Amino acid sequence: MDAVVERAASVGVEAKLAPQLSIVVPVLDEEGSVEELHGELAAALSDVGRTYEIIFVDDGSTDQTLTRLADIVDIDRSVRVISLRRRFGKTAALVAGFRESTGAIVITMDGDLQDDPAEISRFLAVLDGGSDLVVGWKRERHDPATKTVPSRVFNGVVRRASGVSIHDFNCGFKAYRREILDDLRLYGDMHRFIPVMAAWKGYRVAELEVHHRARRFGRSKFGAARMVSGMFDFVRVLFLTRFMQKPLQLFGGTGILLFLAGLGCGAYLALLKFAYGQSIGVAHLPLLLLTVLLVLFGALLFAIGLIGEMQRHIGYRPADEYSVKRRLG
């Protein structure tokens, strides 16, 4: 393995000038896997025939992950490490890696050894075939039901609502052309919806079935609870992709529905007053207030939230998403 690492490092040195390939690996408390992952990456990349760099982004690990990564930097000059000051989340870690990377092609993968680096050549072949983004599909997953069942539900909802025919939107194993990364604004947990945003912008998105390995070290950082936050992020992405340039379609539609509901309530009160001669007194006051609230407060609260999201999108700066503690290599 040492000979492979040395040969891979010699190839990686050329990447200091203009690497063709950047590997971005976000890690969190993966002290047991990063050294083995590096060895597998070195072996796989030595055969692809392209200059490269490997960027590990430590998302605030509290174990010995950063120490293990520092040892890797000492033996392989193609490796760089970005250490964030605290845990900012996977999206922020990916944004940090994207900004630090310089390759024309960027490949992301998880640091838990469940993604197989030997698949990298297959991703490159699909990109060479004309695709702009290649998303891995773990058809046979080696995860507990607490992850696989919510994942299937989540992917099914996103697939039907977005119209993007991808089976595993949240798979960390992806290959990108540089121009996609320069064209996306990622924050919150929006890394899950990169295929949706890329497809909306007109990029060619492909899917590749990949080998998924069982976790051997540590434990998963995600579970069923993230599906709830994921759905909120999905609503955000749908708004940004479908209504950002045509907000009247959403605001106007919502306003019309609320107005018609209020108009219906008002018509009912008018019918009681003029057709049946009933006075609109205290007994009808709740309905009268509801008529006003439907027209005003519902539209106002919803609009405030979405306008705030638009301002967040317009004022987005990648540097706001993370803070680098130090750099190695």
Image (cartoon, rainbow, N blue to C red):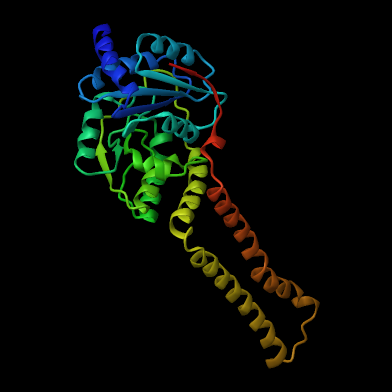
Residue lying at 31% horizontally and 46% vertically, measured from the top left: 166
Residue lying at 54% horizontally and 35% vertically, measured from the top left: 319
How many tags in the picture?
0
Judge by depth and name the residue closer to the eye, 297 or 145. 297
Asked if residue 33 lies left or right of residue 44, the reply is right
- 315 in relation to 210, above or below: below
Judge by depth and name the residue closer to the eye, 293 or 164. 164
Judge by depth and name the residue closer to the eye, 246 or 298. 246
**Residue 140 figure quarter:** top left
**Residue 106 figure quarter:** top left
Judge by depth and name the residue closer to the eye, 89 or 258. 89
Asked if residue 221 lies left or right of residue 114, the reply is right
- 245 in relation to 137, above or below: below
Q: Can residue 170 be seen from the camera position used here?
A: yes
Image coords of residue 92 (percent x, y): 50, 34
Image coords of residue 116 (percent x, y): 28, 25
Q: Can residue 223 be seen from the camera position used here?
A: no
- 85 in relation to 155, above or below: above
Residue found at the far front of this picture: 17
Residue lying at 68% horizontally and 92% vertically, measured from the top left: 275
Image coords of residue 71 (percent x, y): 42, 9
Give the position of the C terminus as an image quadrant. Answer: top left
Residue found at the far top of this picture: 2
Asked if residue 314 lies left or right of residue 20, the reply is right
Image coords of residue 254 (percent x, y): 55, 67
